[in-house]
Image (cartoon, grey):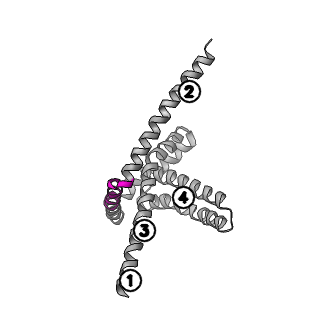
Amino acid sequence: MQSLLRYLIQALKAVGTVLVALLLIFEEWGWDPLSRLLKRMARLPVWSQIEKLIVRLPPYAALGVFAVPVLALIPIKLVAWYWVAQGHALVGLCVVVAAKVLGTAIAARLFQLTQPALMQLPWFARLYNRWISWKDRVTDRVRQSLAWRKARWGQRCVRRHCRKHARLVWLNLRAVFRP
């Protein structure tokens, strides 16, 4: 009985690690580009003023600003999962994905703005360093896996194929519309 329980716990840990790894990969993939996208909004005068206020916040206020938008998306995700449970899977999944992308974009930009203040909190700096260390170990393990390497190889093949055909389409369009 104990060996079965031990096996079940190991299986749950493995599944959990895979799910967390996928989440981390998505976050890592989206964090920088989405943050850059929101940084472009700082060109707007009102947005620029808001960002300047956020940068000057003391540590605990910065923590609140960082946490509120992330927590505000939880009800949206719950409603989306309710829709999935009610048989509206496509709508629910689209809302979950949109909320995840929006949440990642907002969290990434806010973290860039609040990180100096947040790192002044000793407990936050300690947890952040542990998080980064753990995240790096998990993502390294994922990147070393055969599945990841094959997926990256497939991605490169698809990109090459798309570039080749996009160039051919462009050349054909130029030939058609050339005066």
Q: Residue at left 38%, top 83%?
A: 4
Residue closest to the eye, 9 or 79: 9
For the residues labelled 3 and 2, say whether their Cβ atoms are less than 8 Å apart. Answer: no
Q: Determine the CA span between mark 1 and mark 2.
A: 58 Å
Q: Which residue is mark 1?
A: 4
Q: Residue at left 39%, top 49%?
A: 150
Type of amino acid under label 2: Val
Is 51 rendered above or below residue 1? above
Count of picture labels: 4
Is 91 rendered above or below residue 161? below
Residue 130 covered by magenta stretch: no
Question: In the rendered image, which quarter contains the N terminus?
Answer: bottom left
For the residues labelled 1 and 2, say whether their Cβ atoms are less than 8 Å apart. Answer: no
Q: Which residue is mark 4?
A: 69
Disc 4 crowd rating (10 Å Cα; few below 14, some 14-19, many 20+) is: some
Q: Nearer the viewer, mark 1 or mark 4?
A: 1
| Circle 3 SS class | helix
Going from N to C along the chain, the mark reached first, 1 or 3, is: 1
Going from N to C along the chain, the mark reached first, 1 or 4, is: 1
Q: Determine the CA span between mark 1 and mark 3.
A: 16 Å
Q: Position of residue 62 (x, y in %)?
A: 45, 58
Residue extent of the magenta highlight = 132-147
Q: Determine the CA span between mark 1 and mark 4.
A: 42 Å
Q: Determine the CA span between mark 2 and mark 4.
A: 43 Å
For the residues labelled 1 and 4, say whether their Cβ atoms are less than 8 Å apart. Answer: no
Disc assigned to residue 15? 3
Q: Nearer the viewer, mark 4 or mark 3?
A: 3
| Circle 4 SS class | helix
Q: Residue at left 35%, top 62%?
A: 131
Q: Nearer the viewer, mark 2 or mark 4?
A: 2
Q: Which residue is mark 2?
A: 169
